[in-house]
Image (cartoon, rainbow, N blue to C red):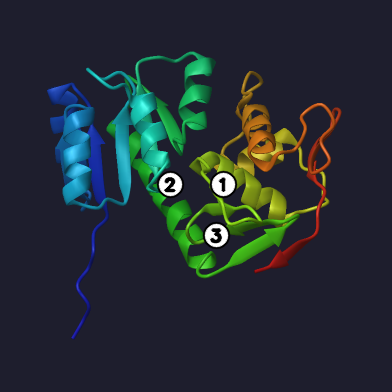
């Protein structure tokens, strides 16, 4: 007897009913299971009653905005998030990624482009889950659990990482003591080419230093090599 096909579940959070209905119809035709919510409150209720493989989240919402919702979600879940917004400024994109979004798409957009982004993020998420099963990386008194995305200090205290911070730290740990350029890190963590104005890697490095207790003025663990990139100077062992 063949196992039943399980279609990915996607939650669309947008206060525009036309966009919700359009995406629900279009993605439903692509064999995704779709739920919708008009604001943060409805999103929270939906998440309490169901689990999802990906969330499409509008940045500008009534009440709690999408950036805050994404940040709060990241504190307790690693579910992938694609941020939608009418704002196209680089700073808005960086903020979305820093709050934990996995990708960022500006309105107006073609549904086919969103579909391509969804497929890419889900493939990446599935590949990470497969390769990260029950695996840990131990370094400099820290332990990174690749399955749960949890970073643990030597005293047992857990440090919350955004999905972008997790991918960045994982990429650095897997290539410890090697210099990685911003372009390489952006490709490894977000699967896209660099934008000349994109400072998301620099911001994520800064946040990682803070969380790892590495002095930004004289970092010993996460080092900057001028005009070259970044290097994680440590010994990494499987946990």
Toward which corner of the image does residue 144 lie, by quadrant? Answer: bottom right
Disc ID at residue 211: none
Question: How far across and down, in percent of the image, does residue 98 sit?
Answer: 52, 30
User: Which residue occupies 82% across, 44% down?
Assistant: 179
Say which element carries label 3.
loop
Q: Which residue is mark 1?
A: 166
Q: Residue 208, image x and y in percent?
A: 65, 38
Say which label, 3 or 2, has the lower sequence index: 2
Return the residue nearer the eye: 189 or 220: 220
Q: Is residue 112 visible?
A: no
First of labels 2, 1 by sequence position: 2
Relative height, residue 107 to residue 159 (above, below):
above
Q: Identify which residue is drawn at 43% across, 59% down.
A: 126
Q: Is residue 190 above or below residue 104?
A: below
From the viewer's perspective, tell me whether residue 219 is left or right of residue 49.
right
Coordinates of residue 93 in the picture (x, y in percent): 49, 23
Q: Which residue is mark 2?
A: 121
Neighbour class for label 3 at 10 Å: few (<14), some, many (≥20)? many
Instruction: Classify 10 Å Cα crowding around label 1: few (below 14), some (14-19), many (20 and above).
Output: many
**Quarter in which the N terminus is drawn:** bottom left
Q: Element type at marker 2?
A: helix
Disc number placed over residue 146 in the picture, else none: 3
**Image-based side of 238 in relation to 131, left or right:** right
């Amino acid at each position: 007897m063949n196992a039943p096909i399980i279609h990915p579940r996607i939650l669309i959070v947008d206060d525009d009913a036309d966009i919700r209905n359009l995406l629900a119809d279009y993605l439903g035709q692509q064999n995704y299971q779709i739920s919708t919510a008009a604001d943060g409150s409805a999103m929270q209720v939906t998440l309490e009653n169901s689990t999802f493989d990906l969330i499409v989240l509008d940045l500008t919402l009534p009440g709690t905005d999408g950036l805050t919702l994404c940040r709060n979600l990241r504190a307790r879940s690693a579910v992938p998030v694609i941020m939608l917004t009418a704002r196209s400024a680089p700073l808005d994109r960086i903020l979305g990624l820093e709050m934990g979004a996995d990708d960022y798409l500006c309105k107006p957009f073609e549904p086919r482009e969103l579909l391509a982004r969804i497929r890419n993020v889900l493939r990446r998420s599935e590949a990470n889950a497969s390769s990260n099963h029950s695996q840990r990386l131990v370094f400099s008194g820290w332990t990174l659990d690749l399955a749960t995305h949890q970073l643990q200090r030597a005293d047992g205290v857990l440090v919350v990482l955004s999905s972008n911070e997790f991918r960045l730290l994982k990429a650095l740990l897997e290539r410890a003591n090697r210099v990685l350029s911003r372009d390489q890190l952006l490709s490894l963590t977000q699967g896209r080419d660099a934008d000349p104005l994109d400072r998301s890697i620099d911001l994520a490095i800064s946040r990682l230093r803070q969380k790892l207790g590495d002095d930004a003025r004289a970092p010993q663990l996460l080092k900057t090599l001028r005009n070259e990139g970044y290097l994680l100077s440590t010994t990494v062992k499987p946990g």
